[in-house]
Image (tube, rainbow, N blue to C red):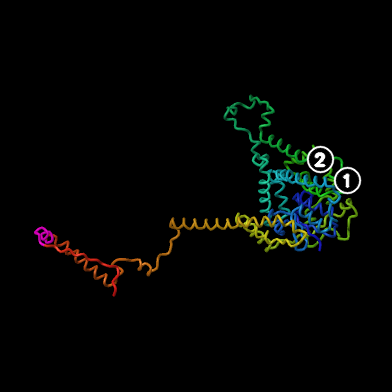
Amino acid sequence: MSLELHIWGPAFCLPSIDAQCIAATAYLSQAVPRENWKLVASSDPTLSPASVSTDELPALRDGSTWVGGFGNIVQYLKRYSDGKWDLDAELDPEQRADCIAFASHIVANGQPLLDLSLYVSTENYTSVTRSTYTALLPWPTQYIVPSSHRAAAKARSAHLGLSALDIDSADEAKPADKSADGSSQIPASLRVKRPQTLMSLLRQPQHASQIRLHTLTKTFLDPLQDLLGEKRFFFSDHQPSSLDCLALGYLSLAIYPDLPQAWLARTMREKFGRLCAYVETLRHSSFGGDVRVKDALLSRPNETLVSEKQEPKDQEDRQEIGLPWVAPKPANIVSISSFLLKNMADSLPISKDLRAASRLRHYPSTDPLIADLNQPLDALANSERPSRATQLLTVAAAVSVTFVGLVYTGFVTLPSLSGKEEESRKGGLEGMGEAGESLKALAAMMDWEARNEPSRVDGGMGSGEPVAEVDVEVRDRVAV
């Protein structure tokens, strides 16, 4: 059974709109024989249980085994092939250490720049990025996925302090309010334009943002250009490494998208021409030239772009062969309904966490090739258990408080007591039956007589005649 690499679909003449998907595609193209793998532009991260923690692609499928993320895919391929598909096999220990360090540098500094360029920038997102997703995704995911990716990009790049500057806002072009200084009353022919000083230019938001972006771009690209030097690849002249594949994913998305605000591509072409030529060479050797959307979204499932019998003799021949695309399964009412339900469940904070922990605990880890790769997933799933109990207690407390509030305000009325319970609560003469009724009548008669003969009582007391006082005790219950 061939390996299947699931990625986000093509964009900007590249295999994918995602940097890590491009990197994984480049690695398999360079390391794995063509007949041993297929490329699927599924654009559906929910296919892989391994991607539940990040909800992202790429994901490699080997039968029932799924491996998510570029780094995990590289490690899995090395073990799967017993080192035959290891692009880093010839690196010495120092180069391996550099490979790890520069890979961290690329992800940490390159991803925020791509986020700012493709998603945070309002003009770039609305005019290019969003429409690109529309061509890749079926209904209704084309309306949900782009906005969720943009929200994630804003969160990842928030620490740079540029997301709040709105560097593409049309408000920057609006004239300032001149009513405060009275200049609006002066005719245009008599106005004298004040010369702009360096400090006034630097204080403008658009110029401050451009300076900050230029600094971030140089911080990202300077170390890579120094490492490349005059070599064809980062560590040698004859074979790329996993670092080259990762760099291709991020640098290609910085160069090739045709954006209205192309500050990132412009800086690369003006200041880092050596890196641009390096990316172009590696792109052709890995992907065989430009990649079109119709190449990936073939008309029939299991249809491939080129014949399986064609095998490139070397890296240069890959230009004539292309990538081993396989058409993704078409969307149907079941898959669309499932996507909508999952999206609704994941939009609720508590439901999202519970679903993620549940899927992580059910992710298979029996395969020895991925046993240690699953350790972070297992740790994450176990860490979710205390929080799950806390969340359930929070929900119970919220329901209880809500119910008490409804009862207090009168929106909810508690049921009354039953007849027998109400009768048992009654005390005094009412609970004595016929005897109680007789005593009530006798007491009423005595009260009437006392009210109607006050003089007799007073006279008797005043003349010294003896008066008899009788204490009557009435019990609650009369034994019959």
Residue 461 within the magenta-colored segment of the rendering = yes
Start-end of magenta stretch: 456-465
In the rendered image, the vertical position of residue 428 relative to residue 175, given as above or below: below
Compare residues 403 and 429 and report the one nearer the observer: 429
Count of numbered labels shown in the rendering:
2
Q: What residue is shown with label 2?
A: 225
Asked which quadrant contains residue 261, the reply is top right
Q: Residue at x 91, y 54 (%)?
A: 313
Q: What residue is shown with label 1?
A: 237
Left or right: 196 as drawn, with respect to 71: left
**Amino acid bearing label 2:** Gln
> What secondary structure is the stretch in magenta mostly built from?
helix
Query: On residue 195, which mark appears?
Result: none
**Amino acid bearing label 1:** Asp
Q: Residue at x 73, y 39 (%)?
A: 216
Residue 314 within the magenta-colored segment of the rendering = no
Element type where label 2 sits in the image: helix
Q: Position of residue 192 (x, y in %)?
A: 65, 24
Q: Residue at x 16, y 64 (%)?
A: 449
Asked which quadrant contains residue 222, the reply is top right
Labels 2 and 1 touching (C-beta < 8 A): no
Q: Position of residue 477 (x, y in %)?
A: 30, 70
**Is residue 344 visible in this depiction of the protein?**
no
Q: Dot 2 surroundings within 10 Å: few (below 14), some, or many (20 or more)?
A: some
Q: Position of residue 163 (x, y in %)?
A: 66, 42
**Is residue 426 visible in this depiction of the protein?**
yes
Element type where label 1 sits in the image: loop
